[in-house]
Each structure stands twice: as structure tokens, then as C-alpha cells.
């Protein structure tokens, strides 16, 4: 698994391209934060993926985005994919 022991934050991760990125990262072993304003969809996707996913409600227009997302699931190695 290419992304084992890595973590990623995917904004717009609850549907569309963001969901595809979340699923691909999780399939490769990453722990994924699904960040989206559509909290219900993000939660459903996190349940579908299992222990490697965490859903958080985030609006990319909020200047606190990086701090909020990274404190939700702190890791030494993170990447962020922004979609939507």
C-alpha cells in the first residue's frame, strides 16, 4: 500500500471527484479526513470506508480551515487535496 501510515485531508471529499480521491487514498492505506460542508454525506462516506476515515464539517472559505482540519486528526505527514 503506497500511502500506508500517511494522512490526507480532502476538501469537497463527500461526493464527486473528492469522493473518488478519498476512496483511492483509503484503498492505498491512507487515513483520510473527509472535509465538506455536506456533513451528512461526509459521515456516510466515512462509515462506508471504516476506521481509516474521519468526517469533519469544513467550509473552505473559513480562514481557520488548516488549523481546524489538522487538529481533528494530527499526523506528522499530511497532504491536502482540494476539490469542488
Image: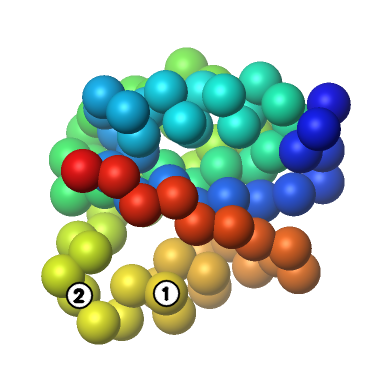
Using residue 81 as the reference point, say whether residue 29 is left or right of it.
Answer: right
Q: Categorize mark 2 by other alpha carbons within 10 Å: few (<14), some (14-19), many (20+).
A: few
Image quarter where the C terminus lies is top left
Do we see residue 47 in this rendering? no
Dividing the picture into quadrants, the one containing residue 15 is top left
Residue name at image x 76 percent, y 38 percent: 3
Q: Is residue 9 above or below residue 47?
A: below
Q: Categorize mark 1 by other alpha carbons within 10 Å: few (<14), some (14-19), many (20+).
A: few
Residue name at image x 33 percent, y 72 percent: 65
What element does badge 2 sit on? Answer: loop
Image quarter where the N terminus lies is top right
Do we see residue 63 in this rendering? yes
**Residue 62, label in figure:** 2
Residue name at image x 62 percent, y 29 percent: 26
* Image spot of residue 31 (x, y percent): 65, 42
* Chosen colour scheme: rainbow
Residue name at image x 44 percent, y 79 percent: 67
* Image spot of residue 10 (x, y percent): 43, 47
Q: Disc 1 marks which residue?
A: 66
Q: Is residue 60 above or below residue 8?
A: below
What element does badge 1 sit on? Answer: helix
Q: Is residue 62 above or below residue 46?
A: below
Per the model, the C-alpha gap separating discs 2 and 1 is 9 Å
**Residue 30, label in figure:** none
Dividing the picture into quadrants, the one containing residue 68 is bottom left
**Residue nearer the viewer, 50 or 8:** 8
Count of marks, rendered view? 2
Using residue 33 as the reference point, say whether residue 2 is left or right of it.
Answer: right
Using residue 69 as the reference point, say whether residue 56 is left or right of it.
Answer: left
* Image spot of residue 50 (x, y percent): 58, 25
Amino acid at each position: 500500500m503506497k500511502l500506508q501510515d500517511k494522512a490526507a485531508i480532502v476538501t469537497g471529499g463527500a461526493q464527486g471527484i473528492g469522493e473518488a480521491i478519498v476512496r483511492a487514498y483509503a484503498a492505498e492505506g491512507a487515513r483520510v479526513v473527509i472535509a465538506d460542508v455536506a456533513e451528512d454525506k461526509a459521515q456516510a462516506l466515512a462509515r462506508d470506508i471504516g476506521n481509516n476515515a474521519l468526517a469533519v464539517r469544513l467550509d473552505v472559505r473559513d480562514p481557520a480551515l488548516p488549523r481546524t482540519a489538522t487538529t481533528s486528526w494530527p499526523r506528522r505527514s499530511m497532504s491536502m487535496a482540494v476539490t469542488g
